């Protein structure tokens, strides 16, 4: 990784890091995509689990108050 200095129109400077080759950048992007997929699956499991739990409670309460 190369360290570069960025300067905006107001003269404020900030440091940034740039990969030395495209292969490093492609590898980093692929790793980020894999992490995003894992996070989306985890959130999906949480949502489905919450809905199933809620429906289970509602069904149980209806049977307890049943006819």
Image: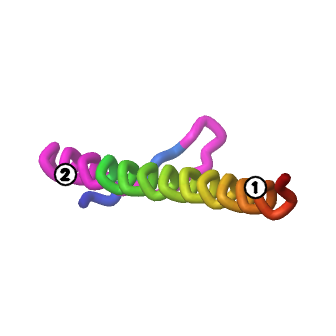
Side of 14 where 25 appears, left or right: left
* Quarter of the figure with residue 56: bottom right
Contact between marks 2 and 1 (CB within 8 A): the answer is no
Residue extending farthest to the top is 9
Give the residue number, with chain letter if any, for mark 2: 27
Name the residue at 70% across, 57% down: 54
Of residue 9 and residue 51, the one placed in the foreground of this image is 51
Position of residue 34 measured from the top left corner of the image (x, y, whole percent): 29, 52
Does 18 appear in magenta?
yes
Name the residue at 73% across, 61% down: 60
Name the residue at 46% across, 58% down: 42
Side of 53 where 1 appears, left or right: left
Q: Which mark is residue 58?
A: 1
Of residue 1 and residue 11, the one placed in the foreground of this image is 1
Of residue 28 and residue 47, the one placed in the foreground of this image is 47
Of residue 13 and residue 55, the one placed in the foreground of this image is 55
Residue extending farthest to the front is 67
* Quarter of the figure with residue 10: top right
- Report how many numbered discs are placed on residues in the image: 2
Position of residue 38 measured from the top left corner of the image (x, y, whole percent): 37, 56
What span is colored magenta in the figure?
Answer: 8-31
SS class of the residue under badge 1? Answer: helix
Q: Quadrant of the N terminus?
A: bottom left
Q: Residues within 10 Å of mark 2 (few under 14, many from 20)?
A: few
Side of 42 where 23 appears, left or right: left
Q: Residues within 10 Å of mark 1 (few under 14, many from 20)?
A: few
Side of 8 where 29 appears, left or right: left
């Amino acid at each position: 990784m190369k360290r570069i200095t960025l300067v905006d129109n107001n003269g404020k400077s900030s440091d940034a890091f740039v990969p030395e080759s495209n292969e490093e950048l492609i590898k980093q992007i692929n790793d980020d995509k894999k992490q995003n997929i894992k996070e989306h699956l985890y959130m999906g499991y949480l949502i489905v689990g919450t809905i199933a739990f809620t429906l289970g409670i509602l069904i149980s309460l209806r049977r307890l108050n049943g006819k």
